[in-house]
Amino acid sequence: MKYPETKSPVFTLTAGPVDAYPEVLRALGKTVLYDYDPAFQAFFENVTLKAQKALACDLPPLILQGEPVLALEGAAASLIGKEDVVLNLASGVYGKGFGYWAKRYAKRVEEIEVAYDTAIDPDQVRSFLKENPEVSVVCVCHHDTPSGTINDIDAIGAVAAESGALLLVDAVSSWAGMPTGPTSSQAAVYVTGPNKCLGCPPSLSLVAVSAQGWAKIEGNPDAPFASMLSFTDWKNAWKKTEPFPFTPSVAEINGLDAALDRYLEEGPEAVWERHALTARVCREGIKAMGVDLWPASEDIASPTATAVRMPDGIDAGPVLKEARARYGVSMSAGRAETLGKLIRIGHMGPTAQPAYALLAVSALGGALKASGATVDVAAGLAAAQAAWDAAIDD
Ligand SMILES: *Cc1c(COP(=O)(O)O)cnc(C)c1O
């Protein structure tokens, strides 16, 4: 028996979009209130303050009405002005991609680019900023998802602060899945979204802007207003007494509220631990199967997605098809530079459960074997189970 492509897979273990929590799906089905109904205005304020608590930021965050690419483009347009010299840090497809937006608005963009299976070295950033004190904005992607690698944004944030540059962070696929936030990274603008580790469908962005970030944005004469990209339009819209610049995504705000409740009730530390354990179980299984991880060193491997390097001569595309057809398991391909070279297993939100890591090792191992690779699936499963048991008995 095989699973046909025309029917939904049985398990979605992707690195985004991710499967949503049942509580979130139920909340999406609530009554759609009129946005100017006082009950909705009070609710929107309440959800924003909950998001502030979850993000642990000083000011109420923005909830923008589109998935996080909207917020990333809006961040570039709002924070970066004609006088700015930007240092863009690229260790993967998203980091590299941000540089193209930065170029649209900046006076000049410099870039440090490293191999997409490695991470940015904060010392290299420090040296660069010493030699180029005119840099006013530093941009970095925290978890470059198509590589499954993590940059040390807290260290990079400290280096940027030393030189007086503002930090802009893409933390879309790491926030709420590991210890990270706008405060520890000292970010002027910290972009994330509920559609990865918070377990919502793709639809909204969350953005924490610091007081310094707002000063820069409000002093930028070219920052967008009366625009889908605008940050300033939404700055005060969280207050129940203030108007919305346009209609918020009412149903999605209901979903976000349920996801935030879930996150805060389970407790951020417990959620992060669940993600870290799932990733550890998965990595142990992959390695013991005789397959390499994509990250050049395991200490930069993300706790929210495991990128698996394809053995020599094996293209990821047919392996993904095989995993889905044989086992009903959907996993993510690479993107751009990493397409074909790796497969990504997401550990985000509801799929950050060690049992799913065992399933992923089984499905990926079986599909690799069916594609002609030499893998020891049984050894992989035994190692994954042992890593899980070790954590239980600890
Ligand atoms: C998912 C994600 C985004 C949102 O962008 P899409 O490509 O539309 O999914 C942005 N940045 C990172 C790092 C992401 O993982």
Image (cartoon, rainbow, N blue to C red):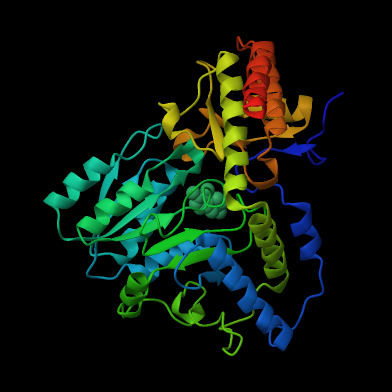
Image quadrant where one finds the C terminus: top right
Viewer-nearest residue: 254 or 162: 162
Task: Name the image quarter holding residue 361.
Answer: top right
| Residue positioned most to the right | 1
Q: Is residue 190 rendered to the left or right of residue 257?
A: left
Task: Name the image quarter holding residue 308.
Answer: top right
- Vertical placement of residue 235 versus 280, above or below: below
| Point 37% across, 40% down: residue | 91
Q: Position of residue 287 (x, y in %)?
A: 55, 18
Q: Is residue 274 rendered to the left or right of residue 32?
A: left
| Point 50% across, 39% down: residue | 146
Q: Is residue 274 rendered to the left or right of residue 152?
A: right
Query: Is residue 387 in sight in this rendering?
Result: yes
Q: Position of residue 225 (x, y in %)?
A: 44, 81
Q: Position of residue 147 (x, y in %)?
A: 47, 36
- Vertical placement of residue 271 versus 365, above or below: below
Task: Name the image quarter holding residue 327.
Answer: top right
| Residue positioned most to the front | 394
- Vertical placement of residue 282 versus 207, above or below: above
Count of picture labels: 0
Viewer-nearest residue: 192 or 158: 158
Q: Position of residue 52 (x, y in %)?
A: 54, 67
Q: Is residue 35 rendered to the left or right of residue 149?
A: right
Image quadrant where one finds the N terminus: top right
- Vertical placement of residue 91 versus 134, above or below: above
Query: Is residue 344 in sight in this rendering?
Result: no
Viewer-nearest residue: 315 or 276: 276
